[in-house]
Image (cartoon, grey):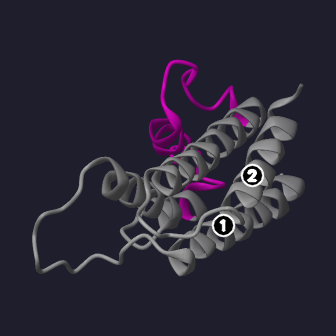
Amino acid sequence: MEEKELSNLYIDLSQEILNKISFDSSLDDQHNQLLFLICVENSLLHLADSVYKIFNKDIEPIDSFGFKFKWIKLQEVNAIKNIIGKELDPDGLIYLVEDSKKKIIKVDENLITTNQPNNLKKFSLILNKYKSFNELLRKILDEC
């Protein structure tokens, strides 16, 4: 299976999992939230590998990196630098995925929290940002 197909498969799986999440703080629900985020991460990882195949002469190999560091490395490519940079910012897709994952793994005992809790709105935003990012990347790559 090609990287692009794997990326699409994982994002489709994340959509199916999102439909099963009730955000009721049960153990099953937390597992589904984590599974959703892992599917988004895997989709981003395979999308990065797909993009790397196009620009492999411009940057060092990224095979051994995790999904976030693959995108940081791909940011060295001038043609896609700005697109990737936005997703690494605190309101970007990659930050949202990591922040959501931390909230599941480590329960914050602080009574005053400023971060958005994991909820349907946030997870839908993650999917929407992913789809926008993917579409923008594809348009740019078609022009290259």
- Out of 18 and 131, give the one closest to the viewer: 18
Dot 2 crowding, Cα within 10 Å, few <14, some 14–19, many 20+: many
- Out of 132 and 140, give the one closest to the viewer: 132
Which residue is denoted by mark 2 in the rendering? Answer: 11
Residue at image point 51% right, 18% down: 64
Element class at badge 1: helix
Distance CA(mark 1)–CA(mark 2): 8 Å
Q: Position of residue 93 (x, y in %)?
A: 52, 63
Q: Position of residue 12 (x, y in %)?
A: 80, 53
Asked if marks 1 and 2 touch (Cβ < 8 Å), the reply is yes
Residue at image point 46% right, 69% down: 24
Q: Earlier in the sequence, mark 1 or mark 2?
A: 2
Residue at image point 64% right, 44% down: 39
Q: Of helix, strand and loop, which mostly describes the magenta segment?
A: loop
- Determine which quarter of the picture holds residue 116: bottom left
- Determine which quarter of the picture holds residue 139: bottom right
- Above or below residue 1? Residue 28 is below
Question: Which amino acid, mark 2?
Answer: Ile
- Out of 67 and 21, give the one closest to the viewer: 21
- Above or below residue 138? Residue 119 is below
Q: In what quadrant of the picture does the N terminus appear? A: top right
Residue 79 covered by magenta stretch:
yes
- Out of 48 and 131, give the one closest to the viewer: 131
Marking on residue 127 = 1
Q: Position of residue 113 (x, y in %)?
A: 18, 78
Q: Which residues are magenta?
A: 55-82
Residue 68 appears left or right of 109: right
Question: Which amino acid, mark 1?
Answer: Leu
